[in-house]
Amino acid sequence: MPPYDPSAYPPFAVTVDLVVLTVRRHALCTLVVRRGESPYQGRWALPGGFVRADEDLGAAAARELVEETGLCAHDPAAPPPVPSNGAHLEQLATYGAPDRDPRMRVVSVAHLALAPDLPAPRAGGDANSARWAPVEELLGEDALAGKAEAAAAAGETGSEEKEGGPEALAFDHARILADGVERARSKIEYSSLATAFCPPEFTVGELRRVYEAVWGVSLDPRNFHRKVTGTPGFLVPAGGTTTRQGGRPAQLFRAGGATLLNPPMLRPEV
């Protein structure tokens, strides 16, 4: 083997960024932190951090998730129900534009995390505040109208925050957030991903409101009930009822072993 000279190649850093999505007050929200240091001091950003020398990408994302939310990454191979402090975590995409970070060449491997209604976040690291922000507030109405690419393009061009318009996120985080939202929106059409937004036991009505929040539409309750209960093993009766949504007692379900919705429930045209 010929000699290898590491100094012949320019160094660069690797980070993980998290698109943490949850449904709060019937709105799709994401976790953002206000940066306390340069660059982009004072701007909102997605949580994340540098990958340590002794950890792989999945471990780095899981560590950041615990530090930012107190949630543990749920092992998708583990049987249901999901632990109360567990969250769905999957790799989203890699972002490596040469000028995406003004400090140095930084490649980010973004991850998507989904969890039920989460408590108020706590700030840490170089962030001086953190909050759950409605996705529509950060990306504009287009984000919930099936036009995530438009929101991503706005993030790539570095659009400034305008009065009454979406807030400008630091780095290329608008693009990353738009990609994460689109991943969630597309996967709930055919998979059980929407149940990751629900508690271990939930009603069909609560699951429907997740779809409505993620897609930004209203769905017919009868048709929705028929579709999600029509795939054997997609939802499993939990053996109880609840009145937490008001009205008559509603049957409780949990996610079953079937992870694919057949036929898929295509999102309505908006």
Image: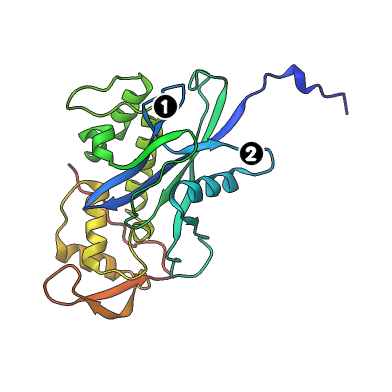
**Quarter of the view holding residue 193:** bottom left
Residue nearest the viewer, comparing 2 with 6 = 6
- Point out residue 188 in the picture as x, y percentages from the top left corner: 34, 53
Q: Neighbour class for label 1 at 10 Å: few (<14), some, many (≥20)? A: many
Residue 112 horizontal side relative to residue 228, left or right: right
Q: Dots 1 and 2: beta carbons under 8 Å? A: no
Residue 169 seen: yes
Q: Is residue 49 above or below residue 28?
A: above
- Residue 172, numbered circle: 1
Residue nearest the viewer, comparing 59 with 253 = 59
Q: Neighbour class for label 2 at 10 Å: few (<14), some, many (≥20)? A: few
Residue nearest the viewer, comparing 115 with 185 = 115
Which of discs 1 and 2 lies nearer the camera? The answer is 2
Amino acid type indicated by mark 1 = Asp
- Residue 15, numbered circle: none
**Quarter of the view holding residue 237:** bottom left
Residue 16 seen: no
Residue at the image point whose x is 42% and y is 41% from the top? 123
Residue bearing the label numbered 2 = 52
Residue at the image point whose x is 35% and y is 73% from the top? 232
Amino acid type indicated by mark 2 = Arg
**Quarter of the view holding residue 53:** top right
Determine whether the residue tagged by mark 2 lies in a helix, strand or loop. Answer: loop
